[in-house]
Image (cartoon, rainbow, N blue to C red):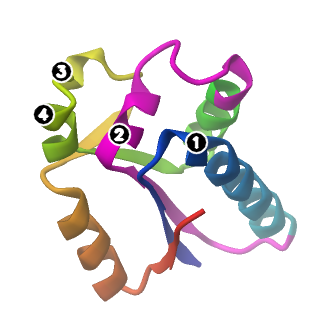
């Protein structure tokens, strides 16, 4: 299963990470292969800064990263928010443009989910 989650608002992080955790649990229980990416753009890129989200959400994110989930941030959104990619939490992939990433993933057969 190939899925890309699109997070563009800070208030969507909790639902998105809950969805990711539930999906991982199901996929692993059913021994299914997967590729999952969580792409943040707009104001939601701030969720990749240390200390912005709750500790419990960062724990879910870290566990998901350890299980192969890719967490990506839009470079254009980072620039618009005056954020330096070096300040993001560890292992955050910075992509040139979130909308291009979303379109490319969908063309590659990824299902689009927007919590």
Q: CA distance from mark 1 to mark 3?
A: 22 Å
- Choose the circle earlier in sequence order: 4 or 2: 2
Which residue lies under the disc numbered 2? 43
Which residue lies under the disc numbered 1? 11
Which residue lies under the disc numbered 3? 84
State which quadrant residue 22 falls in: bottom right
Q: CA distance from mark 3 to mark 2?
A: 14 Å
Packing grade of label 2 (10 A; few <14, some 14-19, many >=20) is some
Q: Is residue 73 left or right of residue 63?
A: left
Above or below for 65 versus 68: above
**x%, y% of residue 80?**
15, 36
Magenta stretch: residue 56 in it?
yes
Say whether residue 38 is visible: yes
Q: In percent of the image, x 69 and y 51: which residue is there?
A: 15
Which residue lies under the disc numbered 4? 79
| Disc 4 + disc 2, Cβ < 8 Å | no
**Residue stretch rendered in magenta on the structure:** 30-57
- Choose the circle earlier in sequence order: 3 or 2: 2
**x%, y% of residue 55?**
68, 18
Q: CA distance from mark 1 to mark 2?
A: 10 Å
- Choose the circle earlier in sequence order: 1 or 2: 1
Q: Nearer the viewer, residue 107 or 54?
A: 54
Q: In percent of the image, x 16 and y 24: which residue is there?
A: 82
């Amino acid at each position: 299963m190939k899925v890309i989650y699109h997070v563009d608002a800070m208030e969507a992080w909790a639902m998105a990470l809950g969805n990711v955790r539930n999906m991982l649990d199901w996929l692993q229980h059913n021994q299914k292969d997967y590729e999952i990416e969580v792409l943040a753009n707009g104001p939601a890129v701030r969720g990749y800064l240390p200390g912005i989200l709750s500790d419990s959400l960062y724990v879910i994110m870290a566990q998901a990263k350890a299980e192969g989930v890719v967490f990506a941030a839009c470079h254009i959104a980072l620039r618009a928010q005056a954020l330096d990619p070096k300040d993001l939490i560890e292992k955050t992939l910075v992509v040139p443009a979130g909308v291009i990433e979303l379109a490319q993933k969908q063309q590659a057969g990824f299902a689009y989910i927007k919590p």
